[in-house]
Amino acid sequence: MYQPSGDWPMLAIAIVPYQQYGKTFPIDEALYKGTLFPDLYRPYKPEKGGYHD
Amino acid sequence: MTRYNKDFEELMALQFAIVELNLFLDTHPDDEQALRDYNRLVEQFEMAKKAYTEKYGPLVNFGYGKSKHPWQWVNEPWPWDR
C-alpha cells in the first residue's frame, strides 16, 4: 500500500457548506433532474468542461 | 419519457420529492418550511395513491388497498405499465 511521506501528497480537508432551504423545482421536473433542489443540480455534460476539454 | 402513464408518473414525482425532503429533514430537523412542504406533499401523495388504486388496482400486494373482484394483484400488465 502506498504511504505518503514528507510534505506531499498532503491530506485532504473536505469542506461542505450547510444547505439552506430555498427554492425547489416543480416535482415533475425534480423527478427527471434527479434532485428537488436547484442548489444541488449539477447536470453532467461531458461535451463541456469535461475530460476532453 | 412516457413508459409510465401520467397518473403513475405523478406518484413517482410525489414520492421522489418526499424522499428528497426526508433526506433534507434528516440533517435539518428544525426547518419549518421544509417540514411544511414535506407534510403537504405527503398529504397529496396519500390522496394520489388512493385515487390511483381505485382506478388501476393495488400498487402493492397487500395491506394498503382493497381489491375488486377478481383479485387484481396478479393482473398483467402491471398497473404502472397500463
Image (cartoon, coloured by chain):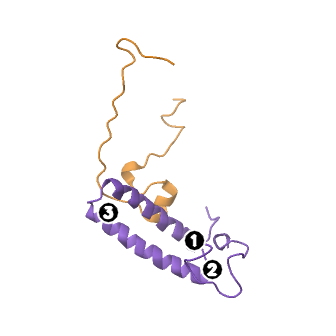
The residue that disc 2 covers is: B56
* Of residues B9 and A12, the one drawn nearer to the viewer in this rendering: A12
Q: What residue type is labelled 1?
A: Phe
Q: Which residue is drawn at 37% across and 60% down?
A: A24
Which quarter of the figure has residue B31? bottom left
Q: Chain B is drawn in which colour?
A: purple
Residue at far right of view: B76
The residue that disc 1 covers is: B8
Relative to B24, does residue B47 appear above or below in the rendering?
A: below
Relative to B29, does residue A15 appear above or below in the rendering?
A: above
Locate residue B33, reporting x and y percent.
28, 64
Q: Chain A is drawn in which colour?
A: orange
Q: Is residue B63 left or right of residue B26?
A: right
Q: Residue at x 46, y 76 (%)?
A: B46
Q: How crowded is mark 2: few (under 14 residues within 10 Å), some or many (20 or more)?
A: some
* Of residues B12 and A48, the one drawn nearer to the viewer in this rendering: B12
Q: Earlier in the sequence, mark 3 or mark 2?
A: 3
Locate residue A6, reporting x and y percent.
36, 11
Locate residue A53, reporting x and y percent.
51, 29
Marks 3/1 in contact by CB < 8 Å: the verdict is: no
Q: What residue type is labelled 3?
A: Ala
The residue that disc 3 covers is: B34
**Label 3 residue SS:** helix
Marks 3/2 in contact by CB < 8 Å: the verdict is: no
Q: Mark 1 lies on which chain?
A: B
* Of residues B23 and A3, the one drawn nearer to the viewer in this rendering: A3
Marks 2/1 in contact by CB < 8 Å: the verdict is: yes
